[in-house]
């Protein structure tokens, strides 16, 4: 049995989806700060290699399981007596949600419901939820936490929004929540995304790069370690029943700019850029958006890297120049 003894924030923490991209970086930070951490992941997207460096740590426990097995999940809750749940588990591939709509229902919404139900039964009072800019849909304004109406353009966004609703309703019964809405998160250990795909494509064919849409799509990109900083800052520095924050940067980077940065970083010249056309890269794509991040900034938080700095750093990671875990091979 793990012990709990860290002041006003309970020491034993559950991270769902902890072998995934953001979840594994969060676990790195929580362990470095002295918490006991239990990681649940079904490894459908997560990788053991993301958390392998912690497997010998006495303050870390990895459990491979499907969160929809609620009988087993409740046993885990009962065994460890969590003080807080960081719910990172979800389908993070928006395009996959269109190919198989059940994916977001099961991996994103029903995992949230399962976590909330075990929290209710085992009297766990705190949840930190990884939400998304996708809940806003296509709004022309700079996005604030109270922007609306909210009409998501993807099943992923719809499942995140439904999860937010269930979490907020649970808080009416005594829970406390931190809902953190991410933009495009990039960096070491990512498994998909525009620049990740560009690197893969150019490793296969360094003479030509096919770009979905018209290349004018422009969005804020946030470095994964800044994401973890922001999550933990919000958790420590806000204390309402429901605490909701946009987490991001004020600048944005276009897809065409990313293509140029990738080709430069790879030392390639005279690459033929082939655009498929249209404002959107795929069904459910939000071609342009920007965040109002003043709410969290007023509490004292700001990302260390701008959007374009994050892009440059992530591309180096994907090329294996930093943080070797992100090195990409040509095959899938």
Image (spheres, rainbow, N blue to C red):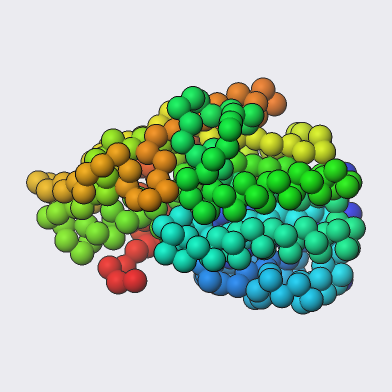
Q: State which quarter of the image contains the C terminus.
A: bottom left
Residue at x 62% of width, y 39% of height:
230
Q: Residue 180 placed where, x, y %?
A: 64, 42
Quadrant of the image occupied by residue 121: bottom right
Residue at x 60% of width, y 72% of height:
42
**Residue 39 horizontal side relative to residue 95, left or right:** right
Q: Residue 175 placed where, x, y %?
A: 85, 48
Residue at x 52% of width, y 44% of height:
152
Which residue lies most toward the left here?
270
Q: State which quarter of the image contains the N terminus.
A: bottom right
Q: Is residue 9 above or below residue 68?
A: above
Quadrant of the image occupied by residue 232: top right
Q: Residue 74 placed where, x, y %?
A: 81, 71
Quadrant of the image occupied by residue 313: top left
Asked if residue 189 shows in the view, the reply is: no
Give the camera-side residue of 130 and 307: 130
Asked if residue 107 shows in the view, the reply is: yes
**Residue 13 horizontal side relative to residue 297, left or right:** right
Residue at x 68% of width, y 70% of height:
67
Q: Residue 54 placed where, x, y %?
A: 63, 67
How many labels were placed on the picture?
A: 0
**Residue 326 horizontal side relative to residue 7, left or right:** left
């Amino acid at each position: 049995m793990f012990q709990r003894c860290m002041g006003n924030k309970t020491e034993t923490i559950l991270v769902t989806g902890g072998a995934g991209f953001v979840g594994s970086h969060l676990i790195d930070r929580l362990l470095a700060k002295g918490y006991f951490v239990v990681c649940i992941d079904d490894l459908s997207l997560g990788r053991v290699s993301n958390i392998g460096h912690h497997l010998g740590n006495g303050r870390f426990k990895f459990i491979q399981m499907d969160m929809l097995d609620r009988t087993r999940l409740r046993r885990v809750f009962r065994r460890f007596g969590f003080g807080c749940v960081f719910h990172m588990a979800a389908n993070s591939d928006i395009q996959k949600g269109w190919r198989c709509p059940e994916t977001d229902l099961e991996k994103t919404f029903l995992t949230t419901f399962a976590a909330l139900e075990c929290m209710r039964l085992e009297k766990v009072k705190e949840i930190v939820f990884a939400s998304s800019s996708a809940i806003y849909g296509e709004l022309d304004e700079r996005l604030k936490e109270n922007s609306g109406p909210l009409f998501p353009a993807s099943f992923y966004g719809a499942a995140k929004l439904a999860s937010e609703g269930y979490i907020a309703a649970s808080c009416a019964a005594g829970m406390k929540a931190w809902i953190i809405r991410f933009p495009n998160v990039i960096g070491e250990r990512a498994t998909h995304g525009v620049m990740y795909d560009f690197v893969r494509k150019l490793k296969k064919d360094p003479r030509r790069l096919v770009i979905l849409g018209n290349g004018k799509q422009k969005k804020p990109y946030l470095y994964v370690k800044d994401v973890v900083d922001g999550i933990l800052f919000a958790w420590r520095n806000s204390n309402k029943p429901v605490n909701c924050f946009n987490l991001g940067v004020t600048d944005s980077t276009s897809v065409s700019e990313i293509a140029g940065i990738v080709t430069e970083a790879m030392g390639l010249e005279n690459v033929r850029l082939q655009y498929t056309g249209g404002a959107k890269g795929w069904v459910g794509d939000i071609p342009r958006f920007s965040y109002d991040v003043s709410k969290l900034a007023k509490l004292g938080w700001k990302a260390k890297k701008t959007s374009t700095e994050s892009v440059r750093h992530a591309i180096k990671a994907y090329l294996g120049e930093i943080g070797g875990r992100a090195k990409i091979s040509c095959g899938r």
